[in-house]
Amino acid sequence: MHPESNRMIILVFLLGMAIVPLVAIAECIPIGFHPEGGAIKCFLPSFFKDFLPLGGLLYIFLGVATIEEIAKFLVIKIKVLKSSELDEPLDIPLYMIIAALGFAAVENILVLSFPEKPLLIKEASIIIAFRFVGATFLHALASGTLGYFLARSFFTPKQKRKLLFTGFTLAIVLHGLFNFSIIKIGENMMVKNGQIILVNPQIFYFSLSALIAILVGLAVFVTFGFRDLKKLASICKITTNQSANSNH
């Protein structure tokens, strides 16, 4: 395995950070400001919730998870896939994870800087735990999963669309389920007089269990995916061999 250049690693991380404002705009589609308070009015979430059945749930999957997974993928597609520094299969999920970590870093800062409501210290601590641990791992592992299927597609070009569809579907569905679990945990937990109170313990613990299961499942998949990719010949060698064969 060849070490990746620090320049490319830093660049991909920064690009992952840079796409967050664009993703925020895409997830909102601003159409003005609310008369009271001056908050930005968003078209996309309102459209899902007002005009589609199960709109709130669909927005989590289609309006958030899908946009974020596509955005992180585009960083790699535009900057990495055609780079001469991409010389082995494992590079693809590694760079996907690096872009995801950059994305998660900015997203976490924005969530804590602009909360939907004023937070007590204990509430902020809980959110930090979920965001900096849970959401960061989620972004990295979901992108790593998609990166595995993307790397695999180089070796089976005839199945490229199928592999990419599978990778995107897994990443988006599990990302959406994670976000849904986070929302349910937040809805069923409150802080009163400095004490954490569970509004509905059954939903809270079920959502927490689902969240943990998603992260563990993704971690196991990515671990075995990395082992699988280590066994494959480098993309560079494959390209060279294919070129040599075509010249005979």
Image (cartoon, rainbow, N blue to C red):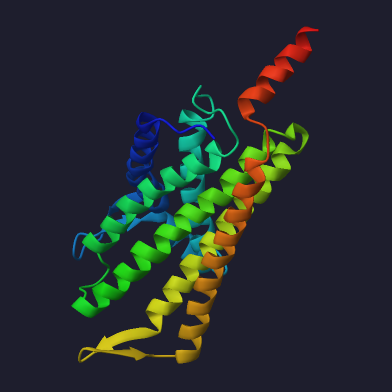
Q: Is residue 145 above or below residue 132?
A: above
In the rendering, at what x and y percent does residue 9 appear?
39, 36
Is residue 33 in view? Answer: no
Q: Position of residue 213 (x, y in %)?
A: 56, 71
Residue reaching furthest to the right: 248
Query: Where's residue 71, x and y in %?
Result: 46, 43
- Residue drawn where x is 27% and y is 56% of the image: 110
Residue positioned 33% across, 50% down in the render: 31
Locate residue 92, reporting x and y percent. Answer: 54, 38
Q: Using the rendered image of the protein, determine whether residue 163 is visible from the camera's viewpoint.
A: yes
Relative to 64, 92 lies left or right: right
Q: Is residue 46 left or right of residue 193?
A: right
Residue 131 position (above or below residue 4): below
Quarter of the view holding residue 219: bottom right
Q: Residue at x 32, y 52 (%)?
A: 105
Quarter of the view holding residue 43? bottom left
Which is more toward the observer, 138 or 117? 138
| Residue projecting furthest to the front | 1
- On-image quarter of the N terminus: top right
Q: Nearer the viewer, residue 135 or 226?
A: 226
